[in-house]
Amino acid sequence: MLGFLTALGPLTIDMYLPALPTITDDFGATAAAVQLTLTGTLVGLAFGQLLVGPLSDAVGRRVPLLAGVGVHLIASLLCVIAPNLATLGTLRVLQGLGAAAASVVAMAVVRDLFSGFAAARLFSRLMLVVGVAPILAPTIGGQTLQFTSWRGVFVVLTLAAAAIMAATAIVLPETLPVERRRNGGIAGTIRDYGRLFTDRVYVGLILVAGLAMAALFAYVSGSSYVLQDDFGLSEQQFAYVFAGGAVGLIGATQFNVRLLRRWTPQQILATSLLAGLAFGLVLLILSVTEIGGLVGILIPLWLVLAMVGLAMPNAPALALSRHGEAAGTAAALLGAVQFGVGALAAPLVGVLGVGAIAMAVVVFGGMLAATLVCFLVVQPHRLPVEQPETVVALVH
């Protein structure tokens, strides 16, 4: 069930990517303007998590979750009849708000039940879903576009939200007992966020997660234009190539489970960021020199995505392990930073010119900033190490 919940956000973000050039033509807009509809989704995901996280700590996980998925369902249905780009962008914000409930509650449920190495392993499994969803989403979107317009993509999203809402109501139990709920109201929420911001390591870890996500969303927002407009791929070919990057992401997140048998989350996080920075530099050099053509772009890009796949489970696990007493709020701030930074990265590619160089600059910049924050702020070598055999489920 947690897998379905974590899939809703990536499906919402990625399913309409093959249609971005078509939407640009239909509304007579610029590529940068259409990319703002993606930014709107990420902004909704960011702010929605800030609202839903503390609410789920106060009233439990199920009620905010069902309400959020309901908002997503309605917004998806209205996207089908959006008359202009401004309306579509507004509805995409509401879609993001709804998907935020699914994302933050899934992470909070993990923290309700597990900590440390066990949480890192479960996050790795959930990252499998996050990786599969980008493979399936553009492919589903591309196939849908063979039979209908881009509006049909939002019909599919409406049906997906309805199915997830029904399954959630039937399958997912409440994982936050009444005695563990936090009912401090607005003042208590402000205190909880204030306490989180005083934890230097936690703030550093969520920034690392957000900056790594920026590299990912630079690829998400720019790849459709780079691959279709610059290299002439069709919508279906783009979906297949996009899937190749997701395969690297998936493989890395699942390989992380094996790596955790020998190394700590701190060691894996630091190493993956350094490697990702090196691959990002190669991507930038090959983009500027145009050496290798399409292959010269895709190989280092996929390697960067693989390194992001190693960083993604470990940074959240380390961050949330520090604040189990307010898991929903801590998960909300983590998710808000991830998608908020991603929201900034998505239009930045368009502002810089949409092409391969613009995408490479943002990808490399995200990895460089994440690496600097990791080593200068988090200082992973100084974090306490939890032994795998000591980690047990907190709630059964």
Image (tube, grey):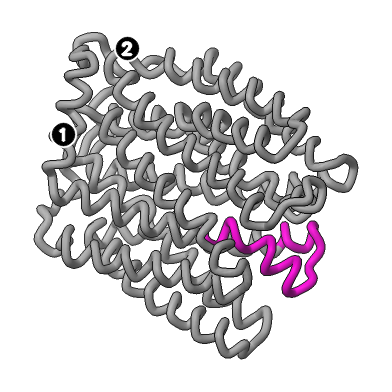
Residue 50 visible here: yes
Specify start and end residues of the magenta stretch as a single range.
218-240
Q: Which of marks 1 and 2 is nearer the N terminus?
A: 2
User: What residue lies at 52% left-to-right and 73% top-to-bottom?
Assistant: 360
> Which kind of residue does numbered mark 2 sit on?
Val
Q: Is residue 237 magenta?
A: yes
- Residue indicated by mark 1: 194
- Residue indicated by mark 2: 59
Residue 250 visible here: no
On screen, residue 175 above or below 345: above
Residue 81 location, x and y as percent? 77, 28
CA neighbours of label 1 inside 10 A, class few (<14), some (14 to 19), many (20+): few
Q: Is residue 353 left or right of residue 66?
A: right
Residue 137 location, x and y as percent? 67, 46
User: What residue lies at 20% left-to-right and 26% top-to-bottom?
Assistant: 190
Q: In this view, does 179 lie to the left or right of 349?
A: left
Residue 123 location, x and y as percent? 38, 44
User: What residue lies at 17% left-to-right and 20% top-to-bottom?
Assistant: 188
Q: Is residue 137 left or right of residue 119?
A: right
